[in-house]
Image: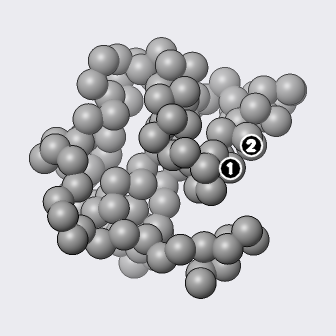
Amino acid sequence: MRERDPDVLFLSWCGTAERRMTVAEVARRPGWAEISAVRARRVHLLPESLFGRPGPGLAEGLRLLYECVYGDAAAAAQAAARRAGLAEGALDWPDGPPQEGSPQPEARGARGQRS
C-alpha cells in the first residue's frame, strides 16, 4: 500500500462488524501514516451493503463514491457512517484534524486525471 501511495482510500469490510471500523484504526496501521490519503485525511469507510451485494444498492454506492471524490466529502463520509451504523467517533482521527500545511491530494478533473 505504501509503495502505491494512493490519494484516497475507500475501505469496506466484508464479514466483520462495521460498528468497529474507525479511521483511527486505519491510520495506526504500521507505516500507513506515510500514505498520502492518510496524511490528507482522505480515508472513507464505506458500508458493505452498498458494495458487497448485487442489486440497487450498488448505484447508491456509486453516488457515494462520487461525492467522496468530487463532491462534499465530509457530508458523504457522515452519510456512509450512518448507513454502516458506525460507532460514535468512528470518523475521528487519532491526532485530531489535519494540521495547517499538511499535504493535500492533487486536484483531479472530471475524469479523475491529475491536473
Give the image location of residue 97, x and y in percent.
Answer: 21, 47
**Residue labelled with disc 1:** 66
Query: Which residue occupies the extreme right position in the image?
Result: 55
Whether residue 31 is visible, yes or no, is no
Which residue is pictured at 18% across the width and 64% down the height? 100
Give the image location of residue 111, x and y in percent.
Answer: 75, 71
Give the image location of residue 109, x and y in percent.
Answer: 67, 74
Marks 2 & 1, CB-CB < 8 Å contact: yes
Q: How many numbered marks are there?
A: 2
Q: Amino acid at mark 2?
A: Leu
Which residue is pictured at 73% across the width and 40% down the height? 63
Q: Amino acid at mark 1?
A: Tyr
Query: Which residue occupies the extreme bottom position in the image?
Result: 115
Whether residue 63 is visible, yes or no, is yes
Q: Is residue 99 above or below residue 63?
A: below
Comparing marks 2 and 1, which lies closer to the viewer? 1
Which residue is pictured at 59% across the width and 81% down the height? 114
Q: Secondary structure at mark 1?
A: helix
59 left or right of 107?
Answer: right
Q: Is residue 62 above or below residue 47?
A: below
**Residue labelled with disc 2:** 62
Quadrant housing the N terminus = bottom left
Q: Is residue 103 above or below residue 55?
A: below
Q: CA distance from mark 2 to mark 1?
A: 6 Å
Q: Residues within 10 Å of mark 2 (few under 14, many from 20)?
A: few
Q: Secondary structure at mark 2?
A: helix
Q: Residues within 10 Å of mark 1 (few under 14, many from 20)?
A: some
The foreground one among 103 and 33 is: 103
39 left or right of 8?
Answer: left
